[in-house]
């Protein structure tokens, strides 16, 4: 003070814990659709938090978002003091379902029903086997090969474990016949 008297007193300056987050992705159910999602668990800093999934262009109070396509998302977390942390996450998708091979054989005799159709598939999400949904007289057959086919057009829908599907069709023709006249 003005008389030269002094007193000291310790003071502690504190700060919040470092701002941090962990992002978790929900992969797409089917190839090239919009069923992906991101969830963020935030801590540190000074709540409440604001979340951006577009590299800080827009913020919201939602710690998760859905309806996303596959791709890389740039996340920015902002606390009540405007402190920020950023990171990125990749939303993944299953491999595209594709028909790797398909073939059919027509009945060997006129009015015969010994044709056959086979399809092989890859991709999608499959823990066990694909589901094969045949049309026509082979409806109910859940295999990649249908036998005892009569001449005609057969449609096939193949589904994976998530209900994602692809379609194909097979045509078995009537064999020729001899004209004895």
Image: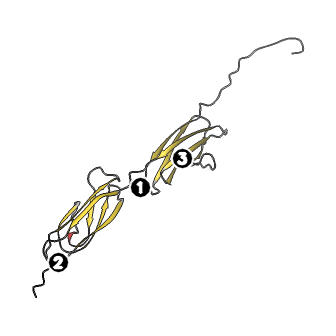
Left or right relative to 83: residue 137 = left
> Quarter-wise, where is residue 162 in the image?
bottom left
* Residue depicted at 34% across the width and 52% down the height: 125
Dot 1 alpha-carbon crowd within 10 angstroms: few under 14, some 14 to 19, many 20 or more: many
Tag 1 secondary structure:
loop
* Residue 26 coordinates in the image, percent (x, y): 44, 48
Q: CA distance from mark 1 to mark 2?
A: 43 Å
Q: Which residue is mark 2?
A: 176
Which residue occupies the extreme left position in the image? 180
* Residue depicted at 65% across the width and 26% down the height: 14
Which residue occupies the extreme front position in the image? 181
Residue 73 numbered tag: 3
- Callout 1 touching callout 2 (CB < 8 Å): no
- Foreground of the two, 18 or 152: 152
* Residue depicted at 14% across the width and 77% down the height: 110
Which is more N-terminal, label 3 or label 2?
Answer: 3
Residue 31 numbered tag: 1
Tag 2 secondary structure:
loop
């Amino acid at each position: 003070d003005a008389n030269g008297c002094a007193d000291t007193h310790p003071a502690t300056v504190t700060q919040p814990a470092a701002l941090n987050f962990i992002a978790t992705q929900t992969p797409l159910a089917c190839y090239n659709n919009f069923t992906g999602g991101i969830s963020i668990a935030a801590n540190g800093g000074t709540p409440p938090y604001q979340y951006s999934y577009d590299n800080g262009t827009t913020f919201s109070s939602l710690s998760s978002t859905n309806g996303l396509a596959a791709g890389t998302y740039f996340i920015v977390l902002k606390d009540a003091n405007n402190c920020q942390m950023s990171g990125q996450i990749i939303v993944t998708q299953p491999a595209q379902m594709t028909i790797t091979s398909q073939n059919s054989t027509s009945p060997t005799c006129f009015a015969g029903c010994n044709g056959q159709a086979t399809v092989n598939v890859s991709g999608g999400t499959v823990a066990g086997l694909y589901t094969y949904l045949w049309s026509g007289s082979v409806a109910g057959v859940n295999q990649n090969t249908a036998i005892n086919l009569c001449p005609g057009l057969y449609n096939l829908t193949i589904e994976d474990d998530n209900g994602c599907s692809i379609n194909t069709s097979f045509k078995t023709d009537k064999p020729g016949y001899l004209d004895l006249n």
